[in-house]
Image: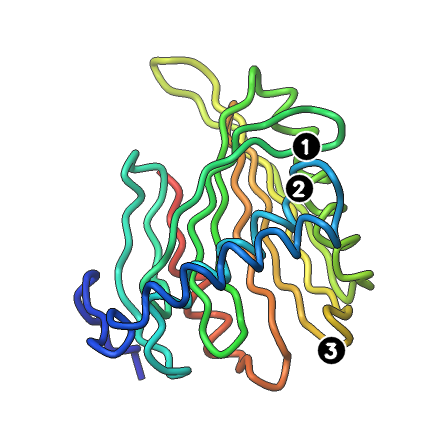
Amino acid sequence: MSPKRSSTGAYCVKCKESNERHTYAIARDWRHCYHLLMKKPSLALLLATLAAASVLSACSPKFDWRDYRSPDAQFTALFPGKPAVLTREIDLDGKKVSLTMTASEVDGNTFAIGSAVLDNAEQAQAALPAMQTALLKNINGTVRSEKSASAASSTAAGIHQRSSLSIEASGTQQGKPVLLVGRFVAQDKHIFQIIILGEERKLSRDTIDTFMDSVKLD
């Protein structure tokens, strides 16, 4: 059965009334994550901050799938709750990258899409294993399955290259076992990471496929 979609701006009154209290909690969590993870920007810190921010729009642990189109039209996707968006500079294998993350958290599970533009296609290709390594390191992960793909297409504007890495991995976060499902894509100078991170017992294969299959890169 296809998931029921709701309007992008929908959220409950109770959540709105508690925004101020949650805002203080987010600030506290930001400082705590920064202290625990590393003293430089990281993918892990960005995800932790987005997960906290998305609580402001999460009314219940039930999935409430809704269409989302990025403001710069780089991708469209179905998110299981109202997503939060955050852009900050991160360290990606020694290179400073301005990464925009769009993420939604439901019942402790994070669904996120990150995007950035690098200087050239060669840098974008090299960023894929770096993104994968950073996320695996964050959960002390063990890869269960991995596959890669690449393709080239020709248009009037020139030749376009697209490569991807896809993984499923198990690990731990805050002492709890977690599942990481990730797809990392380089499309010319653009890079994308599409990930799900959460407790495996709370993530059905249907939920995983609904999110991962819904992502369309423009």
Disc 2 secondary structure class: loop
Q: Position of residue 200 (x, y in %)?
A: 64, 80
Residue linked to disc 3: 176
Amino acid type for the residue under numbered disc 3:
Lys
Q: Mark 2 points at which residue?
A: 42
Label 3 neighbour load within 10 Å: few <14, some 14-19, many 20+: few
Residue at mark 1: 91
Q: Work out how far the residue at label 3 is from the one at label 1, CA to CA, in angstroms.
A: 26 Å
Query: Is 169 on the left-hand or right-hand side of 59?
Result: right
Callout 2, which amino acid?
Ser
Q: How much space separates mark 3 and mark 2, taking CA atoms? A: 21 Å
Q: Which residue is drawn at 31% across and 75% down?
A: 64
Along the viewing direction, whichever of 157 and 18 lies nearer the viewer: 18
The local secondary structure at tag 3 comes to strand
> CB atoms at circles 2 and 1 under 8 Å apart?
yes
In screen coordinates, is 38 left or right of 125?
A: right
- Sequence order check, earlier mark of 3 and 2: 2
Query: Which element carries disc 1, helix, strand or loop?
Result: strand
Q: Distance between the residues labelled 2 and 1?
A: 6 Å
Q: Which of marks 3 and 1 is nearer the N terminus?
A: 1
Residue 172: which quarter of the image? bottom right
